[in-house]
Image (tube, rainbow, N blue to C red):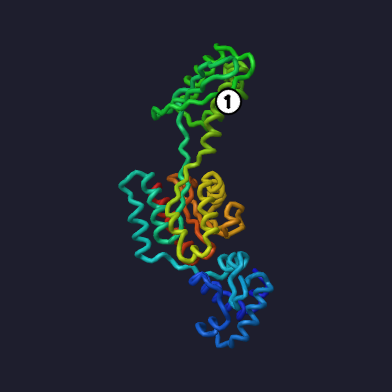
Amino acid sequence: MSSIVEQSERARDIFRLVVESYLDSGHPVGSRTIARTSTLNLSPASIRNVMQDLEEAGLLAAPHTSAGRIPTEHGLRLFVDGIMQAAEPTPQERAAIEGLIDRSGPIEEAISNATAALSGLSACAGIVLVPKEEPVLRQLAFVPLSPRQALAVLVGADGSVENRVIDLPAGVSVSALNEASNYISARLSGLTLREAQARLGAEIRDGQAALDQAAQQLVAQGLAVWSQDGARRPVLIVRGQANLIDPEAAADLERVRQLLGELEGKEEIARLLDRARAGAGMKIFIGSENELFALSGSSVIAAPYRGGDGKVVGVVGVIGPTRLNYARVVPMVDFTAKTLSRLMG
């Protein structure tokens, strides 16, 4: 925490009032506004001196010739981590979230509805990273196309069929392709890709794979194709982008255009949300704290939700301008994540 705010209760109060007023209005806050609306009983001159000290400490900034100040990203981080008093979701907000996350419908629908609820209540874009469903293997067959390529055909336990062209090591015979296909059907059927890879590795280490070197390589390569492909195709739902174009944002259309462009990069957003999934609780990324939104100056509030075994399976949250009502939105995201966890428990 900045030493000036630590050392002075007056500075802390003035800083909090500036941030709260800015988050509420979106406009720079002047010393006269603080003097008029607060109970500090300080003159505008005294408040102005403290605001100057806060600016020198890197917590406030003057955006232009205006006498007012706005919090810097560093100031917002200080406010969120140490000063903000979070407001619990109201009964109406709780009812709206729980009503949309209906227990009677498919889980996919409930997860999608969670983003709609957050988007509507927070006036931001709602985001959710859906659990990656690993296909369960029924069969993985290799069909030769040429001496150096084969078609890998994955048949899932749900009946889905996917094809991928893979490159073959030099000199692989048709019998090695058949041997690899037969091994997968006999030993790996009914397993997820991750489980299949683990069993293949264990059987090779223990000398139980009963496969020659070429067939071992084919099986490993075939399984890896889908593992990598799944990681590259995260299931990400974004709702309510239109909320990002509000009257305040319209004055800065370039920032909005940049943000909407960033939202198209779902892979990058999914990677960002994976950082929240890896943590134990709420993650708040403010502006340039994450590279993805450094240009548009946006904030992300995200919380993981859990499955019946208590393990994190996905992430839900919002994306909006750094001028968010953090005290209201943070508990709302947390409540939505807990509601989804209860639903999936």
Indicate left or right for 240 with 213 as reference: left
273 in relation to 331, above or below: above
The answer to which of 68 and 81 lies nearer the viewer is 68
The answer to which of 247 and 169 lies nearer the viewer is 247
Mark 1 lies on residue: 221
**Residue 212 position by quadrant:** top right
> Label 1 amino acid?
Gln
Indicate left or right for 158 with 16 as reference: left
- Circle 1 residues within 10 Å: few <14, some 14–19, many ≥20: some
The local secondary structure at tag 1 comes to helix
In this figure, what is the number of numbered marks? 1
Residue in the picture at 52% in, 60% down: 253
Residue in the picture at 48% in, 31% down: 192
The answer to which of 158 and 321 lies nearer the viewer is 321
User: Going by the picture, which residue comes out furthest to the left?
Assistant: 104
Residue in the picture at 46% in, 32% down: 135
104 in relation to 137, above or below: below
Residue 93 image position (x, y, % from top left)? 37, 63
Residue 316 image position (x, y, % from top left)? 47, 52
Residue in the picture at 57% in, 68% down: 79
Residue 305 image position (x, y, % from top left)? 46, 50
* Quadrant including the N terminus: bottom right
291 in relation to 153, above or below: below
Residue 329 image position (x, y, % from top left)? 46, 62
